[in-house]
Amino acid sequence: MDPLAWLGLKKQKDAHPQLSAINTAVRELLPDDEPVVLRYIVIVAVLLTRVAHADGVFLECELNHLHQLFQHIDRMPPDGITTLCGTLNEHVPNLSEEELSLCFRELKSLCDANERLQVMRLLAGLATADGGIVPSEHGTLMAIAAELGVPDESLAELEDEALTPDAIPTPPASLPPPPDSALDPADR
């Protein structure tokens, strides 16, 4: 299956150039991974980068946090992480609404409510990488939570948890594994 088919990009690669560039970068770093795993990593990376860019500046501490998260993907070569972060920094701020909508739709199809909550936990953790959650980051988290069907109360709990000094992991928690629903039944 064409790795871009999940986005409806089969032969229209240029219709979604930002998402195509990110997908290509992840696929080059993890050439042996299943397309569903790659899609999941792309989506989570896009959402993390959107939170990092929410205040208009991709701070060094946010970049470091993102690097540490990607280091938990064992198959990802360390030297490729910097390249991937650069690709994300370049392309995520320019994502079209359609590209972002495709990401939300796919994540909702791959993850159950609990798994989406775990993704939101990662996003809240990144928002606190600079010591707090500014209003623009909170707004971005709220918008993402709404798209993913995460209740406002749950988001508030995740933000409070991320702001609690003992709750902020060092190094940050890894990307959650792709959801069980994304695995081929033969792999379970």
Image: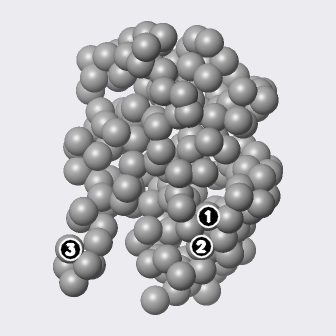
For the residue carrying disc 3, how many other residues have a C-alpha within 10 Å: few (<14), some (14-19), or many (20+)?
few
Which quadrant holds residue 84? Answer: bottom right
Residue at 59% across / 73% down in the picture?
30
Residue 30, numbered circle? 2
Q: The C terminus appears in which quarter of the rendering? A: bottom left
Task: Find residue 47 and report its horizontal and vertical position in percent.
Answer: 54, 43
Q: Position of residue 27 (x, y in %)?
A: 62, 74
Tell whether 55 sits left or right of 98: right
Nearer-N-terminus badge (1/3)? 1
Compared with 92, 4 (above or below) is: below
Q: Is residue 139 above or below residue 22?
A: above
Q: Identity of the amino acid at label 2?
A: Leu
Q: Secondary structure at mark 3?
A: loop
Color scheme of the displayed model: one colour
Q: Nearer the viewer, residue 2 or 67?
A: 67
Cα distance in 3D space between marks 2 and 1: 6 Å
Q: Amino acid at mark 3?
A: Arg
**Residue denoted by label 3:** 188
What residue sits 60% from the left and 51% below the top?
71
**Residue at point 31% right, 37% down?**
117
Q: Residues within 10 Å of mark 2 (few under 14, many from 20)?
A: some
* CB-based contact (under 8 Å), mark 2 and mark 1: yes
Q: Secondary structure at mark 2?
A: loop
Quadrant of the rendered image containing residue 111:
bottom left
**Label disc, if present, on residue 34 of the rendered structure:** none
- Disc 1 marks a residue whose amino acid type is Met
Q: Which numbered tag is attached to residue 76?
A: 1
